[in-house]
Amino acid sequence: MFCYECGAEEENLMDGLCKKCFLKTFSILTIPSEIVVKVCAHCNSKFVSGNWVDPFIAEEEIIYRVIEDNIVLNPIFDSPFDDNLIIDMKILQMRGTIAECFICARALVYDEDISEKHYFNVRLNKDVCPVCSKRNSGYYEAVIQLRADNRQLKDEEIAKVDEIIVKTLDKLFNKDKLAYIAQKATLKEGIDYYVGSLKSAKKLTNKIKEELGGLTNESPRLISEDKSTGKGLYRIWILIRLPSFCKGDFIRFNEKNENKIAQIINISGDKIISIDLNKYDTFKISWKNYNDIELIKEKNQIAKTTVISKSPSNIQILDPINYEAVDIAIDDKNPEKFHNYNIGDEIEVIEIDNILYIL
């Protein structure tokens, strides 16, 4: 068989050419002399095939990814990871938004080592992606309203919610670029958090309720009309109403016509755990029974007093208000610590309905 280019006779021709003529025109890869990519000036995401992708990566990484996307390999190679192929890329220098780049490609082709060099530019056209445009304009889809029932929010509650929001948004941001707080407003009645996306706002609400308990309610509000569809555009206000009581406070709970006097020992998203101050056993209250709970004393009203006498069946203490001696019965239902109290020990008590309870 004869090479149609030079006429040399060879057994195996490549596309009708001998090896020498074939390799003379062979190119390992092709790449444009200039590559232009649109990049968000705020988050570094790049605009590809109508979509903004790969946000928050380094500018150098953007350039290398764009180079990889624009390399066209000779069909004889299966992929850039072909064992007979080595491709080295390098950014020579940056001139403003233009990267001067270099590729050295080496390959083993029909038992011949060949190499080639390519010099080209990558131009970064700066723009603003829709997400950053929304973020910079203060865009939000939902407002989380943090309130407390019949009381002011406590500083530690606000601090805890702020901590939950920061940690949760950090996790959500990988999948939802609108997972941010556009604004935090401190009002007389509580705190309002303006959240970029409704989806993230609902996840934040669930996390806050899981940690602090309370009741929630959603209220959509019409803000404008979509001119293209004629449909209303809504924002969602999500109310988180923390209970009137806090952990350690004292309540009266009406259960089956029985008024229990109890101390709150834990609050979570699905239940309120309390200890009965008469029977000294713990019980759970569902949030659906929240309206049957009455706050009667706060934990800061706990007083301290001293054991002045003790018998097998009684502890005698001083009333912390009038300093009169008060006898409190000890039986099997009392906590073990009650039996271990000694004369002179300082203990905590709470007075409710003129009755002293040892805590």
Image (spheres, helix red, strand yellow):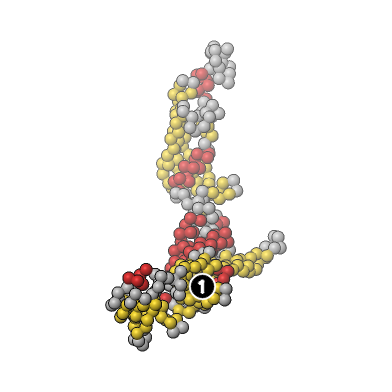
Q: Position of residue 92 (x, y in %)?
A: 41, 41
Q: Position of residue 284 (x, y in %)?
A: 51, 67
- What residue is pinned by disc 1? 243
Q: Quadrant of the C terminus?
A: bottom left
Question: Up-down: is 140 above or below 126?
Answer: below
Q: Tell which of 138 and 1 is nearer to you.
A: 138
Left or right of residue 317: residue 45:
right
Q: Amino acid at mark 1?
A: Pro
Secondary structure found at label 1: loop
> Residue drawn 45% across and 45% down?
61
Q: Tell which of 202 and 351 is nearer to you.
A: 351
**How packed is label 1: few (under 14 Cα within 10 Å), some, or many (20 or more)?**
many
> Residue drawn 34% across and 83% down?
318
Q: Position of residue 267 (x, y in %)?
A: 48, 67
Q: Tell which of 186 and 347 is nearer to you.
A: 347
Residue 302 in view of the camera: no
Q: Position of residue 203 (x, y in %)?
A: 54, 60
Residue 354 in view of the camera: yes
Left or right of residue 112: residue 4:
right
